[in-house]
């Protein structure tokens, strides 16, 4: 087993390698941070499918689902294996760590590494539900952020873009040089043109989510009362032009319309429900690619400090509402809102004031840059407290095998 001393090497917010021990510790810390639930008991838990389970809110959904709801089931993501020159992707190591936690907790999770848009993966999932998980699915959480999607029926590949609609957007963004010195830079995003909106909606809208539900229903795999949630974001007026009112926002609107249609359909067929869950801001590999989001998130943390709610706490609330442990609370558009802490008027007013004042000279006093830079590094397993980064670590960690499930009672309690 090869061992290496790994140091962070990056181009902007993208890192060339990931740290296995840091990723493992990060998942363990998420597990410890997620509140326990008295409703999780010994025995078979509900069967869940989480699509996009290895990063960001999808990872939080997986960890919180284990801790709060005692889920078993199937986790789907796309990650790259280690090579002689490169480590595996961070999501690969996070998945291995999540599998270890699930085994210790006595929960049967199967992890698939493949394109969730493809019919091949859908068939793999269906087969596992039929053979390993009793033939019925209770929950599906959809958390997919992708640059492109190939339609398995037509073979057409669509590409998503981050662009405003109607006119160019002038905004501020936060960057760091090679020495970590921050700069607030003015940027311009050209408006969407041609079929940019349609392409982005085809990738990031509700089309694939609906295909999953239709496919599983066609195989008679949806249990009575089946519930599904797609994870979404609205965000601040400060970033609305490039996000909620831009091409990605059009895709999110399509996702929400899909939820309303699916909700009506599932209510009639299995007494079920479909919702979107609007989450609050977080530093993720997807969010750092959006112009202005890095600056906004750093300023938000500067205002809120420790009151900024981490994803695993938000997803614990989502699982409580999906399972009935807490009342289901929806807004007028049928969405679960987990972002009230972020969009409170006083918080947004304070962030807006700092946004106006933010320059390269003032940013260190207005934003929590130490936290933000550490959060970016933690996406790749670096800057995680308690990890010895001077020590060599094994990088060729195996993907969790699709082993036969451990019988409940023989693998330990479902609570660790």
Image: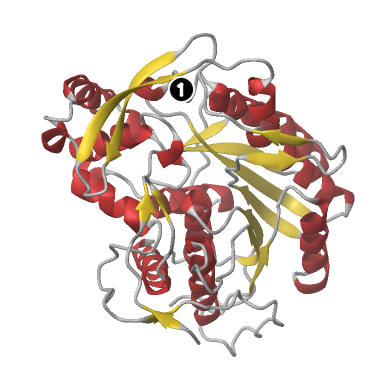
Q: Residue at x 50, y 18 (%)?
A: 164
> Farthest residue in the bottom direction?
410
182 is higher (above) or lower (below) than 401: above
Is residue 341 visible in this depiction of the protein?
A: no
The residue closer to the viewer here, 306 or 155, is 155
Q: Which residue is mark 1?
A: 242
Task: Provide residue 349's location: percent of width, then percent of height.
Answer: 23, 21
Secondary structure state at the residue bearing disc 1:
loop
Q: Residue at x 56, y 77 (%)?
A: 42
Is residue 194 visible in this depiction of the protein?
A: yes
231 left or right of 113 in image: left
Q: Residue at x 39, y 70 (%)?
A: 28
21 left or right of 131 in image: left
Colour theme: secondary structure
The residue closer to the viewer here, 253 or 24, is 24
58 is higher (above) or lower (below) than 388: above
Quadrant that contains the C terminus: bottom left
Q: Residue at x 63, y 75 (%)?
A: 108
The residue closer to the viewer here, 156 or 127, is 156
User: Mark 1: few, some, or many residues within 10 Å (few <14, many ≥20)?
Assistant: many
Task: Provide residue 81's location: percent of width, then percent of height.
Answer: 59, 68
279 is higher (above) or lower (below) than 348: below
The residue closer to the viewer here, 175 or 41, is 175
Task: Provide residue 329's location: percent of width, then percent of height.
Answer: 50, 36
Task: Provide residue 227's location: percent of width, then percent of height.
Answer: 67, 47
């Amino acid at each position: 087993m090869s061992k290496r001393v790994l140091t962070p090497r990056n181009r902007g917010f993208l890192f060339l390698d990931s740290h296995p021990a840091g990723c493992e510790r990060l998942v363990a810390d998420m597990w410890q941070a997620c509140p326990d639930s008295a409703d999780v008991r010994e025995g078979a838990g509900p069967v869940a499918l989480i699509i996009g389970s290895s990063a960001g809110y999808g990872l939080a959904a997986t960890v919180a689902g284990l801790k709060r709801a005692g889920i078993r089931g199937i986790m789907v993501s796309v990650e790259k294996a280690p090579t002689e020159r490169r480590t595996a992707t961070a999501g690969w190591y996070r998945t291995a760590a999540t599998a270890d936690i699930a085994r210790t907790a006595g929960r049967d999770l199967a992890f698939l590494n493949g394109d969730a848009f493809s019919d091949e993966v859908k068939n793999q999932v269906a087969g596992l539900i039929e053979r390993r998980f009793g033939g019925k699915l209770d929950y599906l959480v959809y958390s997919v952020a992708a640059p492109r999607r190939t339609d398995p029926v037509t073979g057409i590949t669509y590409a998503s873009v981050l662009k405003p609609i109607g006119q160019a957007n002038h905004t501020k963004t936060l960057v760091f040089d090679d020495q970590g010195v921050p700069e607030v830079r003015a940027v311009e995003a050209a408006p969407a043109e041609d079929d940019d909106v349609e392409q982005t909606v085809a990738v990031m809208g509700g089309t694939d989510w609906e295909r999953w539900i239709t496919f599983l229903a066609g195989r008679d795999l949806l249990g009575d009362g089946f519930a599904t949630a797609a994870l979404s974001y609205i965000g601040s007026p400060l970033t609305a032009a490039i996000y909620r009112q831009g091409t990605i926002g059009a895709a999110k609107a399509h996702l929400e319309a899909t939820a309303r249609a699916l909700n009506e359909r599932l209510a009639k067929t299995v007494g079920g429900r479909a919702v979107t869950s609007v989450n609050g801001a977080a530093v993720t590999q997807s969010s750092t690619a959006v112009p202005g989001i890095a600056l906004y998130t750093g300023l938000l943390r500067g205002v809120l400090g420790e009151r900024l709610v981490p994803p695993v706490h938000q997803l614990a609330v989502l699982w409580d509402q999906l399972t009935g442990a807490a009342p289901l609370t929806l807004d007028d558009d049928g969405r679960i809102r987990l972002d009230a802490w972020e969009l409170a008027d006083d918080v947004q007013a304070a962030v807006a004031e700092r946004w106006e004042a933010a320059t390269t000279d003032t940013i260190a006093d207005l934003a929590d840059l130490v936290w933000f830079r550490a959060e970016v590094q933690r996406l790749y397993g670096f800057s995680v407290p308690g990890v010895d980064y001077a020590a060599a670590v094994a990088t060729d960690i195996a993907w969790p095998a699709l082993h036969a499930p451990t019988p409940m009672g023989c693998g330990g309690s479902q609570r660790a």
